[in-house]
Each structure stands twice: as structure tokens, then as C-alpha cells.
Image: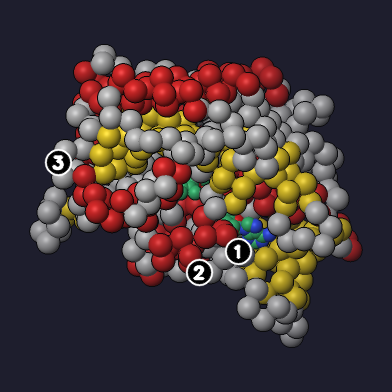
Amino acid sequence: MQNDSRKTCEVCVIGSGPGGAITAALLAEAGMAVILLEEGPFLSQETCAPFSVQEMTMKYRNGGITPAFGKPKVTYVEGCCVGGGSEINSGLYHRTPPAVLESWQKEFALKEASVQAMEPYFARCEAELSVSTMPYSAPAPSLKLHQGATALGWKSMEIPRWYKYEIDSSQASGYLPVRQSMTRTFIPRFLAAGGTIIADTKAHRLLRGSNATWEVNALQKKSQEPINISAEHVFICAGAIQTPLLLLRSHLGSNVGRSLQLHPTIKITAEFPEVINTKDLGVPVHQVKEFSPRLSFGCSISSPPYLALGLLESERAEYAAVASQRMANYYAMITSSARGRISSLPGYDDPLVRYNLQENDFRVFKEGFTKLSQILFESGAVRLFPAVQGVAPVSSPDELPRLLASVVPSKTNVMTIHLFSACPMGEDKSKCALNSFGQLHDLKNLYVNDSSMLCSAPGVNPQGSVMAFARRNVLHFLESRRKA
Ligand SMILES: Cc1cc2nc3c(=O)[nH]c(=O)nc-3n(C[C@H](O)[C@H](O)[C@H](O)COP(=O)(O)OP(=O)(O)OC[C@H]3O[C@@H](n4cnc5c(N)ncnc54)[C@H](O)[C@@H]3O)c2cc1C
């Protein structure tokens, strides 16, 4: 009989986001005995309304706001539940752009990552997640962005998403959109293949066990009881911040946590003269890619709590309650070459995350504020509330110089929902933590298979890249075992 606090398996996967869920499912389906350890709770999508305050409390780490220290600080958002970020995100799907794959091969000596080599992994993920465009008209705030950009002659498009659209006559559109998050896709597949999930349990340290096994020391969050898992192989998939933290805390690996990248993002809340934002708004789907990868624009979640957050810097958060039906949030996202650092602080659970934007990034932010304002005024916006401290709303393009004068590090609210690259893959051991297929250099049977492994910022929404590389690496692992 096995003691409850001691478990044994062939593979322990730590973290059940898009990287961990696909890893665990494919391994279990290949017949391996897999334990999937997840710090957050196991909740169905129906537990709370999407994009609600309740969702932030139940499924986000720290309620959704954690700072990376720098000038300015960058607030970042992480999911913390079974399914990770896939349970709370917008589902916007991109493949890794060809130029990015090329740079990863050249700069990091990443093997087998050409467009042709990656094609089957992207194609399979797209089929399994039902990646598709909407069968009905996009939400009004999304169309506003598209119309404004198109009128200016800038490339704007609907981005496909991992959603299924079930026919439902009770919906205004005639369809019920269902997000194909991990709890809808790879988690049920994992369970059906005989896998075991241990939720509400956090891995704290990894140690070398006897007979070349790995020991995962974990703590159940509610009871504070320890669980120790002995595994032949460990895949760490705890996300771009927590994966390097676990490795640093365990004193494992090199080039870990020193090369964090993210997509720094600034926001504008726009007010229109007419109603554009209704209760069943759903997820905006257009992005302006004319200036990508340097600069991209999109419309963000615009439910009342998100509108209130968007108006905080202009000290008019309460205005969201009055005008929310005429308002929506928009963003400008940049690709920065800055690299941040994650450190483990003795005695503390949370890491110290440092990220300093580069001087040029603020020039790109100013361009972002200018171009996004142009798009929004072109599409009929009457007032813009930029997320810059103390700046009064902007009511016409003539007022843009006043806004731009205030876009300085001490006043600009910078955030991100896209984090990666703190344990990059590749054969160049001077900068990579992992080999080309995710194994830690010189550490047998220990892998990273989540957003940390991406070599640099992809310049597009990252989950498609995370899942395609995770699939590729698991299949490579299984093939290597078969050959051995
Ligand atoms: C609000 C929001 C919107 C987004 N929108 C999009 C989008 O539209 N399109 C897109 O492509 N991407 C989007 N993203 C990004 C996308 O969700 C992430 O890139 C993706 O989830 C990363 O997957 P991952 O497996 O690396 O990590 P995560 O999804 O972060 O999963 C890691 C999991 O590991 C768990 N964990 C962490 N530490 C431990 C530990 N010590 N022990 C046990 N478990 C642990 C966490 O609780 C979490 O569940 C969005 C992200 C957010 C936050």
C-alpha cells in the first residue's frame, strides 16, 4: 500500500496550462503512468462567468495583478487553475511567424524548427482545438477597430480562435461560442487515458532521488500537508515565471530565469456616441497588423470590471458605471528586445521579477498611442481615456501632443498578458537552458515544456507557439524512448 503523501509514477507533469495539459495527455495516451500536479483549483468553465470579477478571484494568480519591478513597473497576469491561462484567455490564435522561427534557428541554434518542420504540429493543434473564425458578425467594438484601421489604409484582420460555435436559437447570434480551453480538450483526454490530476497542490522543490529518479516535493494548499512524488521523468510546465522559479529554488540548470521576455502593452479606453458594448459582447477578434511585429493593435475584454480598470489612471473608474455601454478597451502591444530576470528570494513564495523597458520602447509606445488614437477617432470615438496617470481625456487629434508629452516611464501604465523565454531552447549552451527538444542541458529526464521554452518574444499571441512546440517535444521524447 502506498502512503497517501508518497506517490510514484513514470512521469510527473508540473502545471496544467496549455503546455502541461497537452504534454500530460499525449504521454498518458502513449500508455505512460502520469501524475499532473496543479497549484490551482480544478474548476469547470461554468463555475463563473467569463471575464468577471469572480473569475479573477477564482482562476487568476494574485487576483490578476502582479508587478515586475522596473522603470516603469510592468504588471502581468497569470492563470492559476487547472488549464492555466487557457481558462481565462481570449483564444486568439497565431502560428509562430516564419521570420521568428528563422531567428530562433540562427540565434539559438534551435534544431528542427523550420516552417516545414513545424507545419504538422500547428495543423494538428488547430484541428484539435477547433481553431476557426466566427460564423457571425464580430462584436461592435472589434468592428470599430477594423473600420478605423481600414479607412486609414492599414492591414486589419479577424484572428481565428480556439472556439466551437454550437447552434443555439436562444442566443442573439444564433450560436453559443464555447472556448476550447484545456478543461474542454486535453484535460478530459488525459483523464480518459488513465492520468491522475492532483489539484490545489504546489510543487516547491525538485531533488535527485535514488535510482536516477526525480523527487517532487509539493504542498497541498488547503491542508498544508506535504506530498512527495517520485518520477522517472519530470516535465515542468508551470508557466514563464513559475517554471524558472522552481528550477532556481531547486538549484537546477543554467541560463534559467535570465532572459524573460514579454509583450509590453499600453491601453486606451474609448467612448463612442452610440451603444457598442452589450452584456453578451463576447471577445473582440480583430487585430491591426500593419506595423507588426514592432507594434500591433487590438480590442481587449471590455466587461464593466475591465472598463473600470482601464479608467483607473484617469481617476474616472466610476465613469464606467455610467457610460459602459458606449465604451470599450483597446491596446497597443509592442515587441521589445529587453530581457528581464526572475530571482528566488529565500523564505518567500513569490519570485522577484525585474524587467526594464529599453529607451526606444517609449518611442514605440508614443507611436502606439498616436496611431491607436488615429484609428479610434477615425471610427467615430468622441473621447479617449489613455492609461497614463493624470492625463485628462483626449477629445480630438489636436490634443494628442498633450497626451504624448505625458507618456514617460513614471506615468505610463504598462501591462502584459504574454510572458515567455525565461528558459530558452537551443543547442547554444551559452544562452539556452534547454536543448532543442526541451530537456535541460546536461540533466537527464528533466524537461521544460511551456512558454518558458520559447527562445524570444514571438510578436503574436503565444499559445499557438507553446502548444505546437510542446507537442513536437513530447513526440520527440516518445520516439527517443521507442528507439532506446
Ligand atoms: C488574460 C489573458 C489573456 C490571454 N489571451 C491570449 C490569447 O488570446 N491568445 C494567446 O495565444 N495567448 C493568450 N494569453 C497567453 C496564454 O494564455 C499563455 O501564453 C499560455 O497560457 C501559457 O501556457 P503555459 O502552459 O506556459 O503556462 P500557464 O498557462 O501559465 O499554466 C501554468 C500552470 O502551472 C501552474 N503552476 C505554476 N506553478 C506551479 C507549481 N509550483 N506547482 C504546480 N502548478 C504550478 C499554474 O497554476 C498554471 O495553471 C493570455 C493570457 C492571459 C493571462
Residue to which mark 2 is pinned: 42
Mark earlier in primary sequence (3, 2): 2
Residue to which mark 3 is pinned: 274
Disc 2 residue crowd, few under 14, some 14–19, many 20+, Cα 10 Å: some
Name the disc covering residue 285, or none. Answer: none
Nearer the observer: mark 3 or 2; the answer is 3
Q: Between 314 and 140, which is closer to the camera in this rendering?
A: 314
Left or right relative to 118: residue 15: right
Q: Residue at x 43, y 30 (%)?
A: 332
Disc 1 residue crowd, few under 14, some 14–19, many 20+, Cα 10 Å: many
Residue that extends furthest to the bottom in the rendered view of this protein: 1
Rendering quarter of residue 429: top right
Left or right relative to 77: residue 178: left
The three-letter amino acid code for the residue at tag 1 is: Glu
Q: Residue at x 82, y 27 (%)?
A: 430
Q: Between 132 and 345, which is closer to the camera in this rendering?
A: 345
Residue to which mark 1 is pinned: 38
Secondary structure beneath label 1: loop
Q: Is mark 3 within 8 Å of ligand 1?
A: no
Q: Is mark 1 within 8 Å of ligand 1?
A: yes
The three-letter amino acid code for the residue at tag 3 is: Glu
Mark earlier in primary sequence (3, 1): 1
Left or right relative to 156: residue 404: right
Distance of label 2 from label 1 (alpha carbons): 8 Å
Question: Contact (CB < 8 A) between labels 2 and 1?
Answer: yes
Secondary structure beneath label 3: loop
Question: Contact (CB < 8 A) between labels 3 and 1?
Answer: no
Where residue 331 sits in the image (x, y, percent)? 40, 35
Disc 3 residue crowd, few under 14, some 14–19, many 20+, Cα 10 Å: few
